[in-house]
Amino acid sequence: MKNIVVIGAGTMGNGIAHTFAQAGFTVNLVDLKKANLDRALQIISKNLDRIIAKGNMTDEQKANTLNNISTYTTLEECAAQADLIVEAASENLDLKLKIFKQMDELAPENCILATNTSSISITKIASVTNRSEKVIGMHFMNPVPIMKLVEIIKGYSTSKETFDVIYELSKTLGKVPTEVNDYPGFVANRILMPMINEAIETLYNGVAGVEEIDTVMKLGMAHPMGPLQLADFIGLDVCLAILNVMHDGFKNPKYAPNPLLVNMVTAGKLGVKSGEGFYDYAESRKAEKVSKMFAK
């Protein structure tokens, strides 16, 4: 497995492309907007500079990593030689189904189709392809180059061969793959999102303020980041989308998103990426906070 296509140049997509390229794979990064691709390469370059500053990479290794990445605005330009395509588009079922239909049509027969979805059914996604045995979930954690975990999610028809290939590939990337079955939210978000939602509920009910809630969880529970700050970092729109998937999937009111979360997303307060969420992120503070994540 040498040729990797990554669809989506956002936070997760550029992180996944970075990780594969740094491990020596040939990476084709695809996004509809060239501006997104240019921004992704700038972010990858800056993150590589941080690794160099910590003494864990040379300038030559940085150059090699960047040379491993090519960018395209259409999948048609780069899918024909792909061994693996990783979809990292928005957490939207209709969009993912549309992309997977296209992936299935354009990719060679032996190509594995993976999704970085954090909550949507792998079985549902695979159902629109003619290769459901080769469809699998690779849920990377953010920031991808730093976080070790990859949830490997098997759909109903995912073959053992596909699972084994992706499991071993994840180890090649320096990750710790963990086998998970196909249920809404998988493991990470089935546990994490209700906690974030409950933190929002606690704020909504006036029990404590934003910083006080996060302080309790950081100092009292030894979490590196409070749940409200983490929600900002993930993206409040992403949190809302995941909770909606879980609520629809389980039909259980405990997964219903808090009204405050719904209102904030409706108002465009999405967290770090929009400049404001539970915390205020001016451009200078935004860069500083993201930089600290990579410094850990």
Image (tube, rainbow, N blue to C red):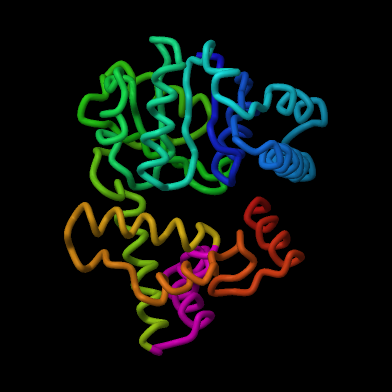
Q: Residue lying at the far left in this picture: please name it.
A: 251
Say which quarter of the image contains residue 21.
Answer: top right
Q: Nearer the viewer, residue 228 or 255?
A: 255
Say which quarter of the image contains residue 12.
Answer: top right
Residue 147: where, in percent of width, then height?
53, 45
Magenta region = 206-232
Whether residue 280 appears in magenta in the rendering, the answer is no
Say if 12 sits above or below 198 in the image: above
Q: Residue lying at the far bottom in this picture: please name it.
A: 206
Residue at position x 62%, y 19% in the image: 26
Say which quarter of the image contains residue 130.
Answer: top left
Residue 109: where, in percent of width, then height?
39, 10
- Residue 46 lies left or right of residue 293; in this view the side is right
The chief SS type of the magenta part is helix
Say if 79 sits above or below 13 in the image: above
Q: Nearer the viewer, residue 296 or 134?
A: 134
